[in-house]
Image (spheres, rainbow, N blue to C red):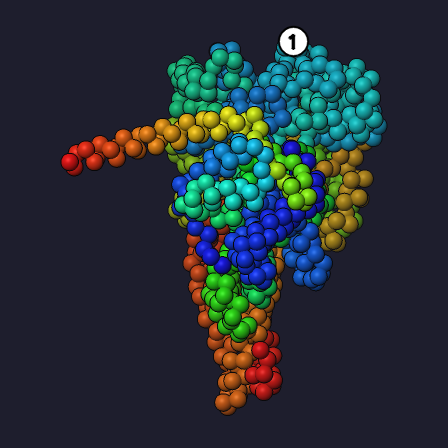
Amino acid sequence: MSWLRRLWRRTYLEAQLEKELRFHLDQHVADLIARGYTPEDAWRQARLALGGPEQVKEKCRDARGTRWLQDLLQDNRYAFRTFRQRPGFTAVALLILALGIGATTVMFTLINSVLLRPLSYPEPDRLLTLHGFTQHFGEFWGFSYPDFSDLKRDARTLALAAWTYGGGTISEPGEPQYVDGREISAELFSTLGLPLLHGRAFRLDEDAPGGAPVVIISYGLWQRDYNGDPAAVGRSIVFEGRPYTIVGIAPPAFQLDGEAEVFIPLGQKPSTDPRMQVREAHFLHVVARVRPGATLADAQAELSLIARHLADEYPKSNAGLGMLAHPLQRELVGDVGSTLWLLLSAVGLVLLIACVNIASILLARAVSRERELAVRVALGAGRGRLARQCLTESAALGLGGGLLGVLLAAMSIRPFVAFWPGSLPRSQEVHLDWRVLLFAIIVSLLTGIVFGLAPALRVPMRSLDQTLRAGARTIAGSSRHLHSAFVISEIALAAVLLISAGMLGRTLLALSSLDPGLNVHNVLTARFALSPGARTNPEQIRAAWQDVLDRARRVPGVESVALADIIPMRVGENVLPYSSTPNPPPNQTPVALSSSASPDFLNVMGIPLRQGRFFDEHDRIGREPVVVIDDNLAQHAFGGKDAVGKRLWVRAMGREPVRVVGVVGHVRHWGLAGDDQSRVRDQIYYPLAQVPPSLLHVFSSIMSIAVRTKIPPLDLVQPLRQELRGAAGDQALYEVRTMEQLVSASLAQQRFLLLLFGIFAGLALLLACIGIYGVLAYLTGQRVSEIGLRMAFGATARDVIGMVLRQSLGMILLGVGIGILATLAASRVLHRVIEGMRPAEISTFAITIAVLVLAALFASFLPARRASRMDPVSALRQE
Amino acid sequence: MTPAKSDLPQGTLDLLILKIIALGPVHGYAIAQRLDQVSRGVVQVPEGSLYPALHRLENRGLIAGDWKQTETGREAKFYRLTQKGRKQLETQAADWQRLIDAVGLILGMADGGAQ
């Protein structure tokens, strides 16, 4: 008989077993009677010889080999029956578990999709990103175009491609719209191993000066503007005033740091962009694929060799410049990994508290069922079997909670990703897959086993006759230690989360109160590119800028207007080396964040002027080149004294020195949290009017407008858009932000983590309080007659309350102590992950611990009061 | 309840049961009787472990049970040896014999040494 068949024929087999044993007994009895025993004696003798019939049956069932499955079914039925009997407990337990497992699953889904799952390109482990490296600057992402071209020509082990940022305005077809774009080398798609969805990639002749104007558009743009029509290939668009032919549609999986919609060939640029010929201009991202047959080590060795050759050949620009290769995945994902793991651990703590909570309830129930279990052992149940049944019950609970949790996770993963501050890398790829399901199942089962283990292990612990003889009173003692351990661990776990949340709160408060270095109220900023038609020569560009300033000033509600290439706290930077001496040692020069601005910039931003003056209308090309520096640079370069009138050598601004005409306050450009730790803290402002004509074309597409307003700044967005559309109507404002938004966004990570930790800590506190309440209610319930006795001998209600509270206070304090130690360890992790994290302060500990202890005492006060109010006589009678 | 104690070495009970069943189809009670009689009371098989052993052997396909009438007219489950059981009995009996011979040899040698 196969085991399946045996399982189906269970009832039949049971009947047979019964019949067989019955026959044995009858036969034995008959024999004994024949030998002269009385029927009663014979019956007794036969029973004794066979042993307990139920025990024998159990052993025979074990021999059948279908036991485990049969038991599982039976245990599950039993479990569901008990759940039905206690719908309140079951619902609460399922809810707690669903929340815990759901939240854990959401975090794991993110970790799985962003960190664990390989990039959706073929052979993703052979994809690299290349970085430059010098002793002085450390590692940086940029490559120059000449270096990239040489590398591409010489490298045997690597296939290489490059890209850089470059958005613009699509003026036809349809309404003019600004789109994010990338300039890419022809090999990019083949290097990534990604075929185009429709059409083709760029040809090599198109990726060179004078190549045909061709464009590849993103999947998103194709869906939006062409309704996903494959016939879009071959159509033409006007981008940046130039007609382009669409040759390809990028597949949806294609993503390069952000969501670009238009891709044009990088190599067509040299005629218009002076950066293309300069080896110092490190503005290209380089992606590489290790060629078949080569290893990462080969590639790294070859890179070092080529870098050395380039340094020999071009010592002026390349001396000391190394090249490093890193996995592409790490580059795309960035530093989001540590945040994700931090959140997963925090959620895991909450889940652990939930487990402990349910474990203590189940344990209390197991203790009160001890006599029932003892009776079942006496009736033939194996002890292992009873333990297994306990575990089945909790595993069923765990799986039920897990199922609900996965449903919760599936519903909340998208909103959560949308809620993530900034953009989560690879966010399109976030979804539940089999790995997540496996994770959820394992977590649910583990959860069930963890909280079911304590009650299950109790089953065989006590000897049978002792339990059966013992009154209900004496049973409680042995589980008290376990219950205390539960309470202590819950308090400790909750303490870790609460103190961490407190530390985050303090950090956020401290960071928010920092002075950003400017007046953030009533300032509106936006990027814009001059109309392509107005960008044909330098004079035209300057006139167009002046036109923008004049028009914006006329808009009602505008107080002052300025143009600048870099807006504080917004992404985008231009870091230049400078020196206060004419011939600094190479690679030893300090660097400064350098912004070009129009004269009103200081007024618009409300940056305080410390000495000298800011630019005015007279600082233009042909006059002495001037700069304004911040007090940090004044301190570093001139010791903070008499900086005005001194000279600075900034190589990017020419061989001749520039004159410092003013000193202004430092602006926290890298965000309230990040500025203190930033590598670049010096700042230089130079007049937009003195930018050399050769660079104007680049500047014409990257400037931003900043407006100080007399009315709420967002009210001016529409009027300004209208006024600044330009003669051809194709000047679009984009990335419109108020300064307040930018400041607040610079703390987005901290605020986001504080919110989540706050929620987790609140949940932990609530769960811990429920746990303490439950345990103390149970423990005092077990001590009813003892308390009654004490009261009969004259103990007052106060004494009783005091006794119970003392008991719980001991557990609470021990838990808090352990929690503090654990937090001290955990705070190092927080420190590493969160920018600007403050060290733990005594007051933070004091406040959060006071909250925790008070809440826990309140939870224990309720059972204590109930115990103090009971009637001693009836308590003593209760047995 | 008498403590279930068997002086039989591990695994011997199965061998004895197989041997008794090999003599012809027999029911559980008769196996217990015969074990008692044949061994002249030396081998005391607690009846509590007889039935689990029978069911285990049946499960492994070494014996098979059929419901038949006894001479008194009652239905009883008669066990018989399967092909597989017969082979198992032969190898186990041979193994057992070798073991006994070896133990006997060693014991005999020890006696000889003492003389």
Check the picture and name the quadrant holding the C terminus of chain A.
bottom right
Callout 1, which amino acid?
Asp
Of A336 and A627, which appears nearest the observer? A336
Residue extending farthest left: B115
Vertical side of A195 occupied by A735: above or below = below
Which of A165/A692 is in front? A165
**Residue A586 location (% of width, % of height):** 38, 28
Where residue B76 sits in the image (x, y, percent)? 64, 42
Q: Residue visible at 57% across and 70% down?
A: A778
- Of the 4 image quadrants, the one containing the N terminus of chain A is top right
Q: Nearer the viewer, residue A149 or B91?
A: B91
Question: Does the rendering let one see residue A31?
Answer: yes
Above or below A231: residue A820? below
**Picture residue at 79% right of the left edge, 27% below the top:** A223
Are there few (<14), some (14-19), or many (20+) residues within 10 Å of tag 1?
Answer: some
Q: Tag 1's secondary structure?
A: helix
Q: Position of residue A533 (x, y in %)?
A: 75, 24
Residue bearing mark 1: A205
Number of callouts: 1
Residue A380 at x, y percent in the picture: 57, 56
Q: Residue at x 45, y 26 (%)?
A: B91
- Tag 1, which chain? A
Instruction: Say if A868 sits above or below A856 in the image.
Output: below
Name which quarter of the figure residue A300 lies in: top left
Is A231 left, or right, of A764 in this rendering?
right
